[in-house]
Image (cartoon, rainbow, N blue to C red):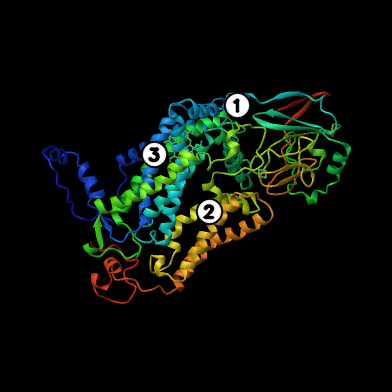
Amino acid sequence: MADVAEEPKRRDFLVIAGGTMAAVGAASLLWPFVQQMNPDASAQALSSVEIDITPIKTGQAITVLWRGKPVFIRNRTNEEIEAAKAVELAVLVDPLARNDNDPGLPATDANRTVAGKENWLVLVGVCTHLGCIPKGQSMADTKGEFDGWFCPCHGSHYDTSGRIRKGPAPQNLEVPPVTFVSDTKIKIG
Amino acid sequence: MAQHESTYKPSNNFGKWMDERLPVARLVHDSFVDFPTPRNLNYLWTFGGILTFCLVAQLVTGIVLAMHYQPSADEAFNSVERIRRDVNFGWMIRNFHAVGASMFFIAVYVHIFRGLYYGSYKAPREILWILGVFIFLAMMATAFMGYALPWGQMSFWGVTVITNLFSSLDSIIPGLGTSIVQWLWGGYAVTGATLNRFFSLHYLLPFVIIGLVILHVWALHVVGQNNPTGVEPKTKADTVPMGPYAIAKDAVAMFAFLIPFAWFVFFLPDYLGHADNFTPANPLVTPPHIVPEWYFLPFYAILRAIPSKLGGVMAMFAAIAVLAFVPWLDRSRVRSTKYRPVYKWFFLLFVITCLALGYLGSKPADGIYVFWARIFTFYYFAHFILVMPFVGLLETPKKLPNSISESVLGKSGGGGGDTVPSGATASPEKR
Ligand code: HEM
Ligand code: FES
């Protein structure tokens, strides 16, 4: 019996075809149950905010909330800008600009800011290691070894362009999608 | 269930009637009263019963808390405060639950180290052991999500840091980690949506644990208990019935365990928690020093010891996963470390390593602390991957007693016999 191949029967075909359809049906029903966990319409709707930046003096920074995450807006001093520009790309941990306005560019300071508005640095204030909020927004904060931000959770140091320089974080702080609505107003998202 | 004749005798007509229809009483009698237990079990064997008690206690107190708790970002913190101040006896029930989680972990760690010391994972108890590892994992997930529920600063930032572990997958496939994390959060950051689903899962998982515990006990009753000698019971003289012997001993241990439990509940309810959790969650301020609950500290130390994000995450999960492979990593011919003159010292070093990692996990991740965390992380893995196989192969074990009764009663009690360390890892014999 073992060496006589059995004729496939109509019943075998029906069993396989029926079983396959049931499996496909079950699998496609699973999808909504997975998908329901993703950010819902109301979470997605909070996708843009406009901010008046006139009150932020040179050297100051504010934090705003965008999509439930803090966003740092810093009016950088000339020294900070110069320091950020002087950095050789070769010494950077993460060579990419991480700028949502134009992803994939090299991590120069120019690629992380808006041309002509280099004093304004806008960053998602979430450490790229495990999501703590780095210190450095208020004058009294420790800003780390590179004078930008310092994440106390596991010791990540960011420079004045928000690029990771030392510590466990793998990426530069993200630059969110930013547009200047006017000279005194920016839109995030 | 177990390989012995059922001795259940219904004592009345109703019992007889029932026994012919649904023999639960027989099942309970055979599994928990007339079940043969090795006569030499010490107090480390009472922790299984203690763990069962802990699970039931968490369920009962948890279901009560859920009657008063509100899983929303606005109300969670206040509702826990209301439970502690306004709900009748809420303070006590809430302390039972919060302290209970810590006591549960104390018990499970004793239980795990007991198994490691006496080689209880060795054949034929591999499945029993692996089910235990799954229970441990499910407990960790449950406790992690439970700690999120009071929605204080430590809850919030603990959830942020731990869920962000998955974002390390971005370095394998860009975007994968971020999508998983947003899927877990139900948003672009940890929000009330995250809290709500954690509450749902915190309610669910303990019932999954019950299912796993049933399988664990079933597997135990198929292979029988290990014992301090690691020699399988051979004759009837080697065992005593569970009731009343083991049950009475379990009860003594349970009451002893309840003394520190009650001490914490009534006198130091917040000692095991963290002061930052009395500040409501604030997504704009990270506390200066984020630490998980004490029972996660050794794993947290391993996470931070590795200088790469993905590497740290993998090491942390590997530290738990490696437990599942212990039955095959240990190449020793005998089970019990009592008869292993060399391994004994390595085992001591392993216990010290775990305690040291726990201490280091509570310290800031810099300088000397990271240095030592790396040393101990190295030994943690070396113990499993190098010491267990090689010491097992190379060392000459001490002579095992011929039987359990011989080890308890001296030569006269046991049968005479050969001098080879016999029967150590052999399959279970007739009882
Ligand atoms: C394996 C068993 C369980 C463990 C290990 C566990 C662990 C925890 C932990 C660590 C907390 C945080 C306590 C704090 O620091 O405030 C907590 C809170 C909570 N748990 Fe559980 N739990 C378990 C079972 C359950 C069950 C079955 C329920 C039933 C629904 C439940 C409901 C709650 C509620 C409502 C809270 C929030 C109130 C509070 O924080 O006191 N738990 N749990
Ligand atoms: S979260 Fe910032 S260093 Fe870990």
How far across and how far down the image is residue B10, in percent?
Answer: 14, 43
Q: Quarter of the image containing the N terminus of chain A? A: bottom left
Give the side of residue B314 with respect to residue B248, left or right. Answer: right
Q: Dot 1: what SS?
A: helix
Q: From mark 1 to mark 3, how far is it between C-alphas?
A: 37 Å
Q: Which residue in the structure is indicated by mark 2?
A: B318
* Residue B142 visible in the picture: no
User: Which of B314 and A22 lies nearest the eye of the viewer?
Assistant: B314
How far across and how far down the image is residue B191, in percent?
Answer: 58, 30
What residue sits 60% from the left and 41% below the top?
A: B161
Quarter assignment of residue B416: bottom left
Of tags 3 and 2, the one toward the viewer is 3
The type of residue carrying mark 1 is: Ala
From what the image shows, is residue B350 above or below residue B276? below
Of tags 1 and 3, the one toward the viewer is 3
Asked if the residue under mark 2 is in contact with the one under mark 3, i.e. CB atoms within 8 Å, the reply is: no
Asked if the residue under mark 2 is in contact with the one under mark 1, i.e. CB atoms within 8 Å, the reply is: no
Q: Which residue in the structure is indicated by mark 3?
A: B57
The local crowd at label 2, few if under 14, some if 14 to 19, many if 20 or more residues have their Cα within 10 Å, is some
Q: Chain of mark 1?
A: A
